[in-house]
Image (cartoon, rainbow, N blue to C red):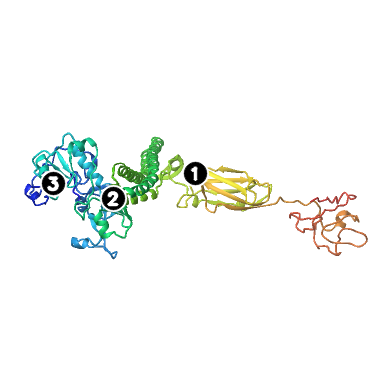
Amino acid sequence: MQKDATASLRTMSLNNEKEGDVGKFSATGSNDDGKKSKGIRECVVNDKVVCRVCKHFYRDPKILPCLHTFCAECIRQLEPFSVSGINGKAALSQEPPYLRDQHAVTILCPECDSEVDLPPTGVDGLTPDHLALDEVFLETLLSENCELVCDLCNEGDAEKRCAVCSVNLCEFCCQAHRRQKKTSSHPVQRLQDLKAQGRLSRPLLCTLHAGEELRLFCDSCDLALCRECAVAGHRDHQCGYAHDVVHRHGDRIRQLLRGVQPRLGRLEEALRAVERAQGAVQARADAVAHDVQAFCRGYTRALEAHCQVLLRRVEAVRAQRSTQLHLQRAQLEQALTDARTGVDFAERLLTCGSEVEILSAKGVTARRLARLAEAEYNLHPAVAIDDGSLCFLPQESAGEVGGFPMFGVIHAKTVDPSKCVIQGEGLQRGREGQRGEFTLVCRDSSGEPMGKGGEAVMVSIVHKDRKDCTVDSMVTDNGDGSYSVSYTPTEPGLYSVWVCVKAQHVKGSPFILTVRRKFRRHQGTFHCCSFCSSGGVKEARCNCGGTMPGGYQGCGHGHKGHPGKPHWSCCGSVVEGSECVALGMGLGSPRSPRSRLRTVEL
């Protein structure tokens, strides 16, 4: 069974060694008798070898799904965030430990506060962090203030190390170790040689078969195996040597790593943008407060009271928006920390880990990197930093305070394009060559009018069938939250009208505008009949369809086809203010100055 190299320093008595047994210290702090261990003296360590919970060397380090490492015992002592039974019901806190093992337990990571689920087998089912064990032992070798003593006699200075048992030995105990039948074949290395290498490379041993090294990997079970495991329980599975399959799983981790690494820069830039937004909000709030104070300085006690009301309003808005930005900043910081932790761990695993170590941790690493690569974040500040979203309006009436009229209000409204409305018929119907108008009224999220202008309003009018046919529009800011829009179409047809505020469509946009052809004026005479209007000229004609006998080409009262009421000679329409609908030529009498019926050319 693989032993902890440094976090769990051990002592073996010579009597026990003769029987082939190994006695162990439970931790770096003390042995079974409660006495302090001499295994490590006055060590100064780096962060990679110290558990963030107990502040000691790692002891049986385990990797949580968020890729943070803690001692197994430290994880067991964490309070469960939630415990649910196999049937989904909440577990009772007073249940005995042997029943709690049957529940799905969720804990909060002490490092990042992420909710992580423990395996069904509990803490023992978590992936061990072999890199952390290597770092612990390497720290004890490289530290100048660290003195190692023999793990067997606990007295002599350690000079060598058994690669299988992972114990430090003095020269005397090393000879005894080699004389034992069970340990005679174990490779022993000098500590000075290990220190000169700069990194620790040790075999990983099977937890089920003593002395057997993990050299195989089962793709079916996603598990590192020894030869005995492969023969006993994985005979029909897809197994292979670790050095043959590690490149495939390593490439998968590298692929996931490439998906997460670019997010570091974006998250850092987004974090800086939020920090700038926080400063802008604070600076703008300070500027508005200064304006309020300057405006209220000349007033009496009532004006001072009004000034305090205004300042409290500014502070409330600033606090609200700062809270939003603070929350977003915390989320981005956590996202950046998670991404950096995943990248650092994966890079360290691929750079420093052995083949088996990579395969042992590849499952939890790949799942974490995949989750980080799929995460989505809002990379833009949650609060607009433009001056219009928070400003002071000194000319606005603020009612009365103590009987004195007050002016000056805080404007902290933000326009909501989905609440903006269009007024006027000029957005639905238009006439070729005639000016059309409509009005846009901006409102906030509660539906109240903005009361002030300055919004970015965009209007686009494009022919639906001819995309190259556009109509220029003019937007006029009325200063009260409304905007007048005018346009003059040059061609009839259906148009698509986009009305946007801050690059977002208003309610109902895009609209359909129907432009009718240009109004046709009558080219004839509005008369009772052509006989009367021409003074009896036989050649005078009318397009109403009426006829007269005696060689007259026009209409007359009481004769066939006469409409029975005044009408236009050019088209026969009986409505004086109507549009001309003539399809032929209008006729007139050139001989009568009173008629002068004009020709209509279509």
Q: Earlier in the sequence, mark 3 or mark 1?
A: 3
Q: Give yes or no for contact between labels 2 and 1 (Cβ–Cβ under 8 Å).
A: no
- The answer to whether 71 appears left or right of 392 in the picture is left
**How far across and down, in percent of the image, does residue 522 sit?**
77, 52
**How far across and down, in percent of the image, does residue 385 sit?**
43, 41
Read off the residue under disc 1: 452
Q: Earlier in the sequence, mark 2 or mark 1?
A: 2
Tell me how far mark 3 sits from mark 2, CA to CA. 25 Å
User: Which SS class for mark 3?
Assistant: loop
Image quarter for residue 280?
A: top left
Read off the residue under disc 2: 360
Read off the residue under disc 3: 10
**How far across and down, in percent of the image, does residue 474 sit?**
60, 43
Tell me how far mark 3 sits from mark 1, CA to CA. 77 Å
Q: Residues within 10 Å of mark 2 (few under 14, many from 20)?
A: many
Q: Nearer the viewer, residue 305 or 125?
A: 125
Q: Earlier in the sequence, mark 3 or mark 2?
A: 3
Amino acid type of the residue that numbered disc 3 sits on in the rendered structure: Arg
Q: Nearer the viewer, residue 353 or 76?
A: 353
Closer mark to the observer between disc 3 and disc 1: 3
Tell me how far mark 2 sits from mark 1, CA to CA. 64 Å
User: Which SS class for mark 2?
Assistant: helix
- The answer to whether 254 appears left or right of 481 in the picture is left
Q: Residues within 10 Å of mark 1 (few under 14, many from 20)?
A: some
Q: Nearer the viewer, residue 259 or 331?
A: 259
Amino acid type of the residue that numbered disc 2 sits on in the rendered structure: Ser
**How far across and down, in percent of the image, does residue 297 sit?**
38, 35
